[in-house]
């Protein structure tokens, strides 16, 4: 055997695959950028596999390096998919806002709950009755207390007044806003709240500290059949709906 036998050079494709895998792994948790990381990892995996094949055929050295490159690229792909799923869920939560977790009938005890409280994960589609409170996942409880139809505005148009209440049962300060509410006609047309010249105790907007409560009226043009509460201005569906007619 020739002691001066020249060693096989390391696989360049395996090295390139490892470098790409490391780059993909380092950027796998970065929003938007990790879209490119996914493809970088795929290219790295292909190069690493090609490098491993050349090593197995005895054309190149660095079998362990090639295997390491394959593993790093696989981990990178998994990290990208996991982070994108996490970011997608976070964006969805931010867009839709806190969701309803349970409801309770009028006459609730401390905390806005009764023994007859029900899960209302689909409260946005389920028509609740006036006086029913809905607790959201962030600790806020919202209630449609009463409805006053047939009000006449300054221009002679009809207005419906709806008294609502927010109760913050959470541990953090939460926002409330009259723009959280929409009225829906019998024809399914939704409208934002409107100005009412004779408004009293009109709900505005602000911060509600933990343990705080605020009530006020929200007014809508014409007759409305349902009141809808949106927990986020970007939500595509209401967190809760009350039937009032």
Image: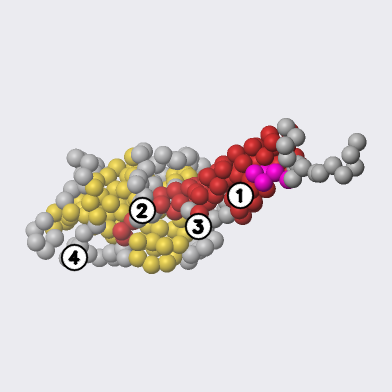
Report x, y in % for residue 26. 61, 55
From mark 3 to mark 1, how far is it between C-alphas?
50 Å
Q: Circle 2 — which element?
A: loop
Q: Are marks 2 and 1 in contact (CB under 8 Å)?
A: no
Which mark is on residue 198? 4
Marked residue nearer the N-terminal end (3 or 2): 3
Distance, label 4 to label 1, CA atoms, is 68 Å
Confirm whether residue 24 shows in the render: yes
Q: CA distance from mark 4 to mark 2?
A: 31 Å
Indicate whether 197 appears above or below 146.
Answer: below
Q: Report how far apart the C-alphas of labels 2 and 1 lie in the structure.
A: 38 Å
For mark 2, what is the residue?
A: 234
Residue, x 64% and y 48% (percent of image)?
Answer: 16
Please state the extent of the stretch shown in magenta in the rendering.
10-14
Select label 4 or label 1 by which is in front: 1
Nearest the eye: 104 or 189: 189
Residue matched to label 3: 169
Residue in view at x 35 percent, y 45 percent: 237
Label 2: few (<14), some (14–19) or many (≥20) C-alpha neighbours in 10 Å = few
Marks 3 and 2: CB-CB under 8 Å? no
Closer to the observer: label 3 or label 2? 2
């Amino acid at each position: 055997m020739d002691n001066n036998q020249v060693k096989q050079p390391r696989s360049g494709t395996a090295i390139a695959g490892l470098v790409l895998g490391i780059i993909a792994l380092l950027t796998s948790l970065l929003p938007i950028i990790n879209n490119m990381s996914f493809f970088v990892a795929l290219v790295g995996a292909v190069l690493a596999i090609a490098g491993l094949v050349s090593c197995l055929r005895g054309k190149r050295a660095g079998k362990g390096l090639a295997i390491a490159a394959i593993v790093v690229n696989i981990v990178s792909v998994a990290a990208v998919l996991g982070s994108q799923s996490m970011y997608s869920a976070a964006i969805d939560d931010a867009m839709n806002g806190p969701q309803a977790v349970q409801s309770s009938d009028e006459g609730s005890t401390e905390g806005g709950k009764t023994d007859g409280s029900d899960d209302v994960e689909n409260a946005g589609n389920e028509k609740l009755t006036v006086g029913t409170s809905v607790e959201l996942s962030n600790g806020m409880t919202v209630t449609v207390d009463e409805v006053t139809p047939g009000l006449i505005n300054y221009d002679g148009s009809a207005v419906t007044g709806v008294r609502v209440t927010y109760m913050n049962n959470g541990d953090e300060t939460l926002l409330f806003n009259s723009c959280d509410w929409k009225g829906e006609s019998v024809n399914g047309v939704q409208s934002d709240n409107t100005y009412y010249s004779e408004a009293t105790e009109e709900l505005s907007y602000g911060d509600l500290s933990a343990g705080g409560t605020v009530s006020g009226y929200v007014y809508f043009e014409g007759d409305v059949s349902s009141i809808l509460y949106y927990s986020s201005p970007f939500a595509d569906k209401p967190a809760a709906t009350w039937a009032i007619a």
